[in-house]
Amino acid sequence: MNIRALADLQKTLTPHVPLGKSRLETLCMILLGMISARTVNLTHIASERPSRAMVASTYRRLQRFFQHVCLPEDWSVGIVISLLGNPRPWHLCLDRTNWKIGKTDVNVLVLAVITVKFRVPLMWTMLPHSGNSTTAQRIALMKRYLAYFDASTVRMLLADREFIGQEWFTFLVEQEIPFAIRMKEGQIVRTNGRELNLRSLLSRCRGVRGFTAVLPGRASHPDLELHFGARRIKGGELLVVASPYPATGAHILRQYKKRWLIECLFADSKTRGLNLEDTRLTLASKLSLLIAITAIAIALICRAAAQLMGHKYPARKKHGYCSKSWFRTGFDEVRRWPCQKNFA
């Protein structure tokens, strides 16, 4: 771990984190250590510290950080936005990531920012149960976002079939948040005076199709007119995406295609990058603190890639994919400590 990089990072974080000098230094050690060691495991991070202190002493220092530090909810948002350079409006992706620590289920509802060069967790909720999130939990997460940012900062909210429901859609429409969310084939819609499910409506769908239909009101919620894009994907499965604003079916599907980037983000934070699943922390507050530090590390990596590449983009191979992703470009650059001069 480069001492100069540690000092530069401390200078960058000082305006955003209400911690004393010693705790702030420990936070920077964890941040740079997890990137250098490619893991969030504190034992490995302790070995990365540039000092004569015993590894066991450094490890205990890192443990005490998670034992005693309690930061406000969403404390990392300001740091992440500062590293992103405030490139709004942006796409937001909503999804869950989950794994097990022994017999304990870790289930996190994540709202991530997606731009051309960045894919970073912005806010999240530690779910106290396994399985899908509830409508109330999604709405609460979006209200936290709206407490920081105006709805006009959202170019499009993208989510998979798990995140549907009349109350949820009504909330997004009322808040004027545009979305492109995949629907289940069994979803009932009303069109031309008839109610039928999407599977029946699109039984003869070939190529890309766009249409408008109404979600019938349920549980005191009014009818909701939505615009749809639909096509058959590999294996003959039906892909149907709903949006509240008029657009062609092809445009809605193109927007939804960006949702895959949150899956790439989860891979970056796990096996392809920082190995988040290596943690043994099970308490929700401590896990949330670790995820916040991981989010800052990912933003730092993306920032390094943006500074290194400038206006250029990673070269593409013949199959159309980049030879090296933005994340991997920044990850390799940040790990070369002598070359990383300034994090501001």
Image (cartoon, grey):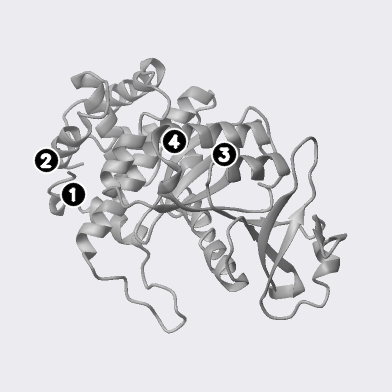
Neighbours of disc 1 within 10 Å: few (<14), some (14-19), many (20+): some
| Amino acid type shown at disc 4 | Ile
Q: Which residue corresponds to the image point at 69% horizontal and 47% vertical from the top-left?
A: 164
Q: Which residue is mark 1?
A: 337
Quarter of the image for the C terminus: give it: top left
| Amino acid type shown at disc 2 | Arg
Nearer to us in this view, 285 or 236 = 236
Nearer to us in this view, 34 or 75 = 75
Secondary structure at badge 1 equals: helix
Q: CA distance from mark 4 to mark 2?
A: 25 Å
Quarter of the image for the N terminus: give it: top left
Q: Which residue corresponds to the image point at 31% horizontal and 35% vertical from the top-left?
A: 78
Of the numbered discs 2 and 3, the one sitting upstream in the chain is: 2
Vertical order, 154 against 329 (above or below) = above
Q: Which residue is mark 2?
A: 4
Residue 97 visible in the snapshot: no
Q: Which residue is mark 4?
A: 291
Secondary structure at badge 3 equals: strand
Residue 214 visible in the snapshot: yes
Nearer to us in this view, 231 or 52 = 231
Q: CA distance from mark 4 to mark 1?
A: 23 Å
Residue 197 x %, y %: 84, 60
Residue 27 x %, y %: 28, 29
Are the residues at dot 2 and dot 3 in contact (C-beta closer than 8 Å)? no
Vertical order, 22 against 243 (above or below) = above
| Amino acid type shown at disc 3 | Leu
Tell which tag, 4 or 1, sits nearer the viewer.
4
